[in-house]
Each structure stands twice: as C-alpha cells, then as structure tokens.
Amino acid sequence: MEGVFVRRHDNFYTKYIQSSNINSITNCRIIPLTVHNATCLNIFDMYTKITFEERMRASNIEFYTHIIKKDHVLIYNVHFQFLNSTRKLFEEIVNSISYLNDLENDLNNKLFEIAKRRALERTQRANQDIKSQAIKKCYAEAGIDFISLYGEISFYNQIKIDSFFNWIGSTKKEGSLKKLIFYIGSRISRDNERLLSRFVSQNQNLIEKRNKNILPAKNKKTSYNINHSYSIFVNLLSVNSLNITDKDFSLLNLYIGGNSTSILFKQLREQQQLVYDVSSVGNANTGEIVIFSKVKNGLLNQVIEKVNTELEKINNGLWDKNTIDAAKNYFKLNSLIIKDRPLALTRAYINYLTNNDGNIIQKSNDDFSTRSSFKVENNVQLCLYGGLHEKA
C-alpha cells in the first residue's frame, strides 16, 4: 500500500481525489491491547458518541467511530465525512479533534455514568454471544490470552470518573498513545493542511510494525455439553510458516472458510448440508486461523472428519482450482471496494501501517506463492455438543 497516501507533516496523511464530492477526515488513536485499555476505550467511545452526535449533526458533518482489535494494539478511529471543504467546517472538525485529545480536562460526571452504562451493556451483549464464548474458550484451551474487543465486565466496578481521568492521562504520559490524521477528498489548501497537522506534530511515530509470531501446534481436542438446539465446532489452526506473506495468508483464509465460496462452506453447507453456517477469520501476524461452525445435532463427528480431510488436502497441495479462483476474485473485488470507500481505505491503510507485511490493496498472483512452504496444523479443536440426542 505504499504510495496510497502522501505523508504531509509528521503523522498527517492525505489522498486527493479530483472527482470526489465526499471528503473525510479520520483521527486515529493507537494504544496497547490490554483488558483495562479495552474496557476504558469502550467507555471512551460511548462518551465520544454522546458528546459529538448532536454537535456534528448541527454542522452537516457525518460522524462515525470504529474500534479495531489487533494482536497487540487497539485502534480507535473517529471519522468525519462532509461535502464542502470550507475553512469554517475544517475549524469545527479540528476543534472536535482537539477536544478529543484533551477530553480529560472537560469530563462530565453525568455523561460519564451514561457512557459507562452503555459500554457495560455492549460488553454484556458481546459476552452473551455464543460464538464469542466458544472462540474465547478455544483460545483458553490453547493457553493463549484472549482479550475481548469491549473489555471485561469485572473491570467496570473498578472504573470511576477519577480513574477514567487518570487512564486518559496515563496513555499520554507513558507515550503509548499514537495519533494520526488522514484526509481523503478534494484538494485542500496548505493553510488547511497545516491546521490539521498541528494536532499531531508533537506525537511520536506510529507504533512499530509487528513481526510474525507463528504459534506452535498443540493438536489438542476437547469437548463440552451445552444447552442448545445445535452443536458448535471451533478449530484454532496454526499456519506454520514464517515466509507466508499477508496477501497469501488472506487468500488461504478465504480458501478455507473466509467467504461463501470457500471450500468448507461449499463442502459442509452447500453440498452435504451438515452445518447451518461455517466461517473462518485469520490473523496474519500470529499465523492463526479460527474456523467456527454451527452444526446440526448428531452430525458433529462428520463435520470434524470433513474439516480434517480438507486441511490434509491443503497440506498435500491438493487444492480445488475453482475455489482458489473464487478466493482470488473475492480478494480483488474487496480491494476495489476498499479503494472506492474512503473510510474502508483509511482503515486498510492503518492496518498496513501496523502490520509486518500489509499489502492488502494489490492484485493477487496467479497462484499462492507459498503453496509448498507452509503447513496448516490443528492447534485446538473445541466441540460443544448441543441438544439431548448427542453426548460428548
């Protein structure tokens, strides 16, 4: 993704589009991934929304927030979208960014309590999600710390307005808070460039790119009974190669279960109708791919056998050509969509800046360049048996 954005001053990036009618400014904050930071950032996000939504609406500015959890950082994006790049509008956005950067100096106890309550409700909803519970349990079986995107319920009692104030301040004092600004849209004046860059000129450079840390496979299988009308299968995979690029890793995940044309979706759902759904998500920095599936009761053992068979085919180089082509087409289409959407492009570029090898937006090769150089190994297989007709 080198060259997608132009770095103007310090951590200020621009991408000028002559035909653009919609302009966007993104204020990005990056902090280390910890349970406490995730919980506090969830409250911070709710406080930001409560404070800004009405204010932005009166200014004809669309306002969004977005939290991204990576293997080592939390990325918090505040997006402003607007039509006309006037000086007054830029000043309104800059004042808003400035307010965010110094939020601890204007905390309101009533708004804090509302934000904390809404944040807790979001954390509770996330914890009640059966998919999140299953994946978290699978990571625990593998002995890997799993930090939820919205923090932990047990931390909320510890967070009062004073400790929240201290948390905001500590991220600055420790130098762990990284801030960037991105602009996409019609060309702006140098005066407005300087106006935007002023708020990041004193910050350190972006956190260093993360080296790959491929997990060793443990080949562990565990099972539990749950009270559900379906069973759940979670498979934590280790892609055992230090040479695989992020692009190839993305294609591998798409091939396994990353979209509706994947090999597992076709085999388990479309052809054999063993599952209600099946999907996979990957983390290229750690070499993890997590397969998740809701399985019809009584069919879990067949699903496990089929998954293992397909993984063995991959390791033996027996790829399904149509599925490979579909994965590459999906990859290219997604890249074009990202290029056409300012907020998606900004998020993709931030992801690139925090990755070791983040060439997300580029054409894929005719084939996986690392086919023969990696192995997909089972780390943990977690089986949650549901219903009354099946026993672990």
Image: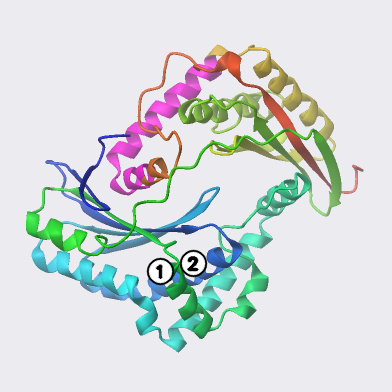
| Above or below, comparing residue 105 to residue 75 in the picture | below
Q: Which amino acid type is marked by label 1?
A: Lys
Q: Secondary structure at mark 2?
A: helix
**Residue displayed at 90% across by 42% down:** 390
Q: Is residue 63 left or right of residue 322?
A: left
Left or right of 12? Residue 207 is right
Mark 2 nearby-residue class (10 Å; few <14, some 14–19, many ≥20): many
Does 13 appear above or below 61? above
Measure the alpha-carbon separation of dots 2 and 1.
14 Å
Q: What is the x, y in percent for residue 183?
A: 22, 51
Query: Which mark identifies residue 141?
Result: none
Quick one: quadrant of the N terminus? top left
Q: Which residues are magenta?
A: 322-349
* Tag in front: 2 or 1: 1
The percent coordinates of residue 56 (x first, y second) are: 26, 70
Q: Residue at x 41, y 21 (%)?
A: 364
Could you say which disc has been placed on residue 41 in the image? 2
Residue 372's place in the image compared with 217, above or below, is above
Q: Nearer the viewer, residue 29 or 89?
A: 29
| Occupied quadrant, residue 153 | bottom right
- Residue 156 lies left or right of residue 194; in this view the side is right
